[in-house]
Structures are given as C-alpha cells and as structure tokens.
Amino acid sequence: MTQNAIEITGLRKTYAATGKSAAKDALKGVDLNIKRGSVFGLLGPNGAGKSTLINILAGLVTKTEGTVKIWGFDQDENPRQSRASIGIMPQEPHLDAFFTPRGSLDVQAGLYGVPKSKRKTDEILDFIGLTDKADAYARSLSGGMRRRLLMGKALVHTPHILVLDEPTAGVDIELRNMLWANVRKLNEQGTTIILTTHYLEEAQEMCDEIAIINHGDLIVRDTTANLLGRLDSKTLVVRPATDATLPALPDTITGQIRTDGTLAFSYHTAQTSADQILDILRNADIKIADISTEQSDLEDVFLALTSGR
Ligand code: ADP
Ligand code: MG
C-alpha cells in the first residue's frame, strides 16, 4: 500500500483557446507525491497553475494528460473512491444564498452520499463556529462566515485529505487564526492538508513540505526546514574604524569589501553565528565603528527562484 496521499505523474493541462485568448499550458508535466499526514504547501506567483492543479484533484477541471492518484485510487479508474478521499475549500467562493449553513452542509453531504445517520452537521457547525448561525440565510452571513462555511462543506464526508486554495487571501487576522487553528486540529486528528498560499510566512509557519510552481512547472520541492536552510543567508555589514582588508575566512563565510569601504560577510545562520564573525574581526585587529545586518527572507528567495523564468 502506498504511503502517499497524492501521487501525480506527468500532469498536463492545456486550456483550449477561446475567441478572446490563445490556448494556455497551465501545467506542463508535473510529478508530485504528497505524503500522508503532512501539511503540504503549494506555492507560486499568480497564474502559476496552483488552482488548476487543485481543481484537477477536486475533479472540477479535467486534465489533458497524466495520472492522478488520490489516497491510492486512480482518479480515472476509481473516480468514486478518489473523490470520497478528498475535500476541497475552493479559491472562488460560491455559496447558494438560499440555503442556511445547516442546509448547505446537508445538501453537500447528500451530494457525497453520506447517509443521514452518519452526518456530522452539528459537529461541523461547532467546528467552524457557526452553531448560532446554523439557521440563518447564507445571504445574511458575513464574508468570514461564508469562508468558514466553505471549510465546513469540504468536511461533510470526513475526507482523508483537505485541500485549501488560498484560504486566507484577503481575510482578517481573526478569521485567519481560526482557519489555521482548525487546519492544525484536523491535521492532528490525521487529516492530510494541502494548501496554496502566496503568503510565505504562512507557508513557513504551517507546512512541513513545500513545492513551488511557476509557469506550470514544478521548480522546487523540499521540506520547509531544508528550504529555509537554503534561504537562511544573512549578511553582517561592518564599517571598520580605519581602512581594513578582509581577514581570512572559513568556507562557510563569504566576505566582500563594498565600494563604500564596509566589509560584508554573508553566512548561513544554521552554520555560523554573528559572534563567530565578530571573533574573527577581533582576532584580525579590525576595530568596528558600526555594524548592521541584512537578512534575505523567504520573499527574496522566492523571487530569485521564480523571476526571469
Ligand atoms: P494560480 O492559481 O497559480 O494563480 P491558475 O491555475 O488559476 O493559477 O492559472 C494558471 C494559468 O491558466 C493562468 O495563466 C490562467 O490565466 C490560466 N487559466 C486558469 N483557468 C483558466 C480557464 N478556465 N481558461 C483558460 N485559462 C485559464
Ligand atoms: Mg489560484
């Protein structure tokens, strides 16, 4: 039995040309496995193909080529089981204004063939904090409540995998915290989580593994820790009290004399501390007039990886 929640091989999607736009290769042959039990982040700039991939998983968009297995079930060979294994909170919220939250959850459970005796409507309403709005019409719900209801709808059939497409785009801090608290709870209870976001701190905070896609290609896939390891470079900038040359440096530190006479030392925080650099300067008798640090954050690295391609 596979230990993967998702196995994607050679996935391509070409949106057909329309009167207004040329044909678009939204996914250009993506291979991606996602482990069971993980919180997996799919990152990429706007138009990268994230929603296309998610919507193919959800069965909302038909792929052009490739295979997709969800919880071990091939999407084409076992459409029913693969669909039952996954719940999607879509990026574009669509809610029927004529249903109450309770009604929406019931209709959704019906669509997924969950028998009445097995429905967990009250439990879900409580989980998404809508118990007291259970019988209010959807059109009277705030934007935040609608988002929460979308999360609830994705959970009616107790899927093994929950996919959230940009769940926190444009939401306030309070809702964001609630959504993430729910995601953590579900993951602790064993649900595999796949999310897309373009807030990098969010991905850093939530995900154990991250893939970055750009223009329909998967360009990086690694654990968050490794990815941050690549990105943890820091630069210590020292203005010497008198003109100074670069001291001898270990391989782990890159030194540079800048045109303004400052000495810049780049290093990885996992390997080197600022203290070590200061010791080197002290031993080389370099007196320091001023000191500052420059940190490249995830944003920089993300840009470095995705720009100019
Ligand atoms: P992301 O979610 O990463 O922002 P999308 O998957 O929505 O990216 O879009 C990927 C590319 O496919 C974009 O260039 C987008 O314009 C195009 N695209 C998305 N949906 C459609 C569609 N229904 N018809 C034609 N092109 C589409
Ligand atoms: Mg999208």
Image: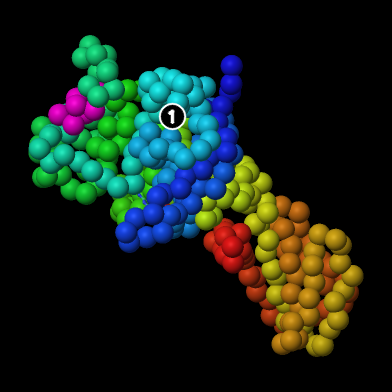
* Relative height, residue 204 to residue 292 (above, below): above
Per the image, the residue denoted by label 1 is 161
Q: Is residue 27 left or right of residue 185?
A: right
| Residue that appears at 57% across and 44% down | 29
Quarter of the image where one finds residue 301: bottom right
Q: Amino acid at mark 1?
A: Ile
- Whether residue 105 appears in magenta in the rendering, the answer is yes
Report the quarter where the N terminus lies: top right
114 with respect to 1 (left or right):
left
Foreground residue among 71 and 248: 71
Q: Nearer the viewer, residue 228 or 288?
A: 228
The picture places residue 288, in percent across and down from the top left corner, at 75, 79
Give the image quarter of residue 286.
bottom right
Quarter in which the C terminus is drawn: bottom right
x then y, percent, for residue 233: 68, 61
Tell me the crowding category of disc 1: few under 14, some 14 to 19, or many 20 or more residues within 10 angstroms, Cα based. many
- Residue at point 70% right, 70% down? 236
Residue drawn 15% across the image and 29% down it: 103
Q: Is residue 138 covered in magenta?
A: no
Please give the range of residues in magenta.
Answer: 103-109
Instruction: Give the colour scheme of this rendering.
Output: rainbow
Looking at the image, which is closer to me, 72 or 271? Answer: 72
Residue at image location 33% in from the left, 61% down from the top = 20
Residue behind label 1 places its C-beta within 8 angstroms of ligand 2: no
